[in-house]
């Protein structure tokens, strides 16, 4: 919450209970003037938002009572007065909860030496669109590119937080009216659309988002990477992100009907895995059962489709490097891929199948499919959330063979699955957001430092950037390094 929001709420919370003693010492007009000044400062400096509407209603009621109450009159209890105080308390609870649960939050300021620009690139592929019913549809993709810049940004307006299509998809997902997320316009970002790319060639990272999430809902992480000298290609997997608006004005939102169709037998597929963990079987007893079950889970097909999106994108990089906003800025010999959740598993598939990838990272995604029989041939980072002990640790089986190169097995303690997104800032209540008990800013700092140091080491070949050094600095990071499948 912002400072004048807090002061305004504090005023309308305290005044109903202390108005009579105050009115004996201070004229009502002065108290009303105080409230008016406080409201004016809030509206001018911070601007109104719908979460504060209960506070505005309370303000009107408090002002009315200040003008009508005699501070020297004796107070007599009545059922009407008691009901009024019950309603007041109810309104106060709502007045405090709404702006606290949905705040105008602050994103972490990027630590890198570059400013960050963004650009959108649209591509219509020649691949059939599997998700729509029209057999003539071709898959179309809209990329958001985050890149380093040295441009002056004086008097420039930063990009609004999250595009309108993603906001609309988020509102639909949680049953909110379309305008419910307009307050996000007040969130300060650190990216500037259309500014020039910094001089030089930069490593390229492809990023794949989570299933059914905001494709661009990773501002903190992606802004940090771009500020450190990476060009980040932010995938938006059409119909499986919350939404995307294409240049000609048409949009595509998450296809819930398609999700229901492909996940119809999900429980039957995953049940054998859940059972072997519940039964307390040891690793060797579980492994063959897990091995068979993970091959047919529906998210494996999603990861295959997303991997095709990303490998097709890699095919386009030479063209992007020859013309357009990224001309000459891409170092195509230093390609990395990473993702979150289902996108993390998709990134793993790309690393397995495309030899142009030099390093890959998976942020808390299960690797579905046949990876369990293979090992990576490039450096690989797996960062897990701090799942409870009863959680089925499927990746312990999937990553049995680790990597022929280095394999980093990490855990962010006291974190939840959404801690790698902006969700902990947007909804700062762990019970609602599904995040862990850790401070969200500390969690994002650790995660972004780890991902940056990993790619700094294996793409930029910078000295003294080894990820394992971070575990000595951050108590909430567990890290183990394997080389060729053995502990280093």
Image (cartoon, rainbow, N blue to C red):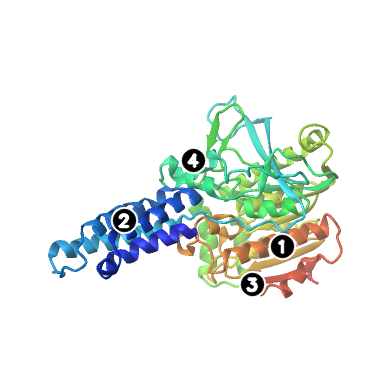
Q: Few, some or many C-alpha atoms within 10 Å of disc 4 (few <14, some 14-19, many ≥20)?
A: many
Question: Whole-percent x and y of residue 147?
Answer: 74, 45
Residue 57 appears in view: yes
Going by the image, does 460 lie left or right of 300?
right
Q: Few, some or many C-alpha atoms within 10 Å of disc 3 (few <14, some 14-19, many ≥20)?
A: some
Q: Which mark is first along the chain, 4 or 2?
A: 2
In this rendering, the answer to whether 185 lies above or below 273 is above
Going by the image, does 54 lie left or right of 342?
left
* Residue found at x 29% / y 55%: 63
Residue picked out by circle 3: 476
Q: Nearer the viewer, residue 37 or 80?
A: 37
The disc at residue 168 is 4
Q: Which mark is first along the chain, 1 or 2?
A: 2
Q: Which mark is first along the chain, 3 or 1?
A: 1
**Helix, strand or loop under label 1:** helix
Q: Nearer the viewer, residue 168 or 351?
A: 168
Total numbered circles = 4
The disc at residue 449 is 1
**Helix, strand or loop under label 2:** helix
Q: Which mark is first along the chain, 4 or 3?
A: 4
**Helix, strand or loop under label 3:** loop
Residue picked out by circle 2: 58
In this rendering, the answer to whether 72 lies above or below 303 is below
């Amino acid at each position: 919450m912002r400072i004048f929001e807090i002061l305004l709420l504090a005023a309308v919370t305290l005044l109903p209970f202390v108005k009579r003693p105050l009115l004996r010492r201070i004229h009502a007009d002065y108290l009303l003037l105080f409230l008016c000044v406080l409201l004016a400062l809030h509206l001018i400096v911070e601007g109104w938002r719908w979460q504060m509407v209960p506070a505005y209603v309370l303000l009107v009621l408090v002002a009315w009572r200040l003008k009508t109450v005699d501070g020297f009159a004796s107070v007599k209890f009545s059922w009407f007065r008691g009901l009024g105080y019950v309603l007041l308390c109810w309104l106060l609870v709502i007045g405090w909860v709404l702006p606290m649960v949905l705040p105008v939050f602050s994103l972490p300021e990027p630590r890198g030496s570059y400013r960050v620009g963004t650009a959108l690139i649209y591509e219509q592929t020649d691949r059939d669109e599997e998700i729509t019913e029209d057999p003539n549809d071709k898959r179309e993709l809209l990329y958001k590119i985050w890149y380093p810049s040295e441009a002056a940004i004086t008097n420039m307006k930063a990009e609004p937080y999250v595009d309108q299509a993603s906001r609309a998809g988020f509102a639909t997902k949680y049953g909110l009216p379309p305008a419910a997320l307009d307050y996000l316009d007040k969130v300060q970002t650190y990216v500037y659309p259309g500014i020039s790319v910094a001089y030089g060639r930069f490593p390229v990272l492809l990023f794949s988002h989570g299933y059914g999430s905001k494709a661009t809902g990773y501002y903190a992480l992606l802004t940090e990477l771009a500020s450190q000298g990476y060009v980040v290609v932010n995938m938006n997997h059409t119909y499986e992100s919350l939404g995307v608006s294409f240049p000609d004005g048409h949009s595509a939102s998450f296809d819930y009907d398609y999700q229901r169709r492909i996940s119809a037998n999900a429980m039957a597929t995953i049940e054998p895995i859940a059972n072997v963990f519940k039964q307390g079987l040891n690793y060797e007893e579980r492994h063959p059962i897990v091995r068979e079950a993970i091959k047919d889970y529906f998210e494996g097909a999603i990861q295959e489709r997303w991997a095709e999106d990303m490998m097709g994108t890699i095919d386009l990089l030479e063209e992007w490097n020859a013309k357009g906003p990224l001309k000459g800025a891409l170092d195509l010999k230093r390609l990395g891929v990473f993702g979150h959740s289902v996108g993390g598993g998709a990134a793993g598939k790309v690393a397995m199948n495309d030899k142009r990838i030099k390093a890959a990272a998976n942020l808390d995604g299960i690797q579905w499919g046949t990876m369990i029989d293979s090992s990576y041939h490039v450096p690989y980072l797996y960062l897990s959330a701090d799942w409870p002990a009863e959680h089925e640790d499927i990746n312990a089986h999937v990553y049995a063979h680790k990597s022929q190169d280095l394999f980093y097995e990490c855990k962010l303690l006291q974190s939840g699955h959404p801690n790698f997104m902006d969700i902990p800032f947007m909804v700062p209540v762990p019970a609602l957001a599904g995040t862990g008990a850790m401070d969200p800013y500390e969690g994002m700092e650790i995660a972004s430092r780890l991902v940056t140091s990993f790619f700094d080491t294996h793409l930029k070949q910078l000295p003294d950037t080894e990820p394992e050094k971070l575990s000595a600095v951050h108590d909430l990071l567990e890290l183990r390094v394997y080389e060729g499948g053995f502990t280093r």
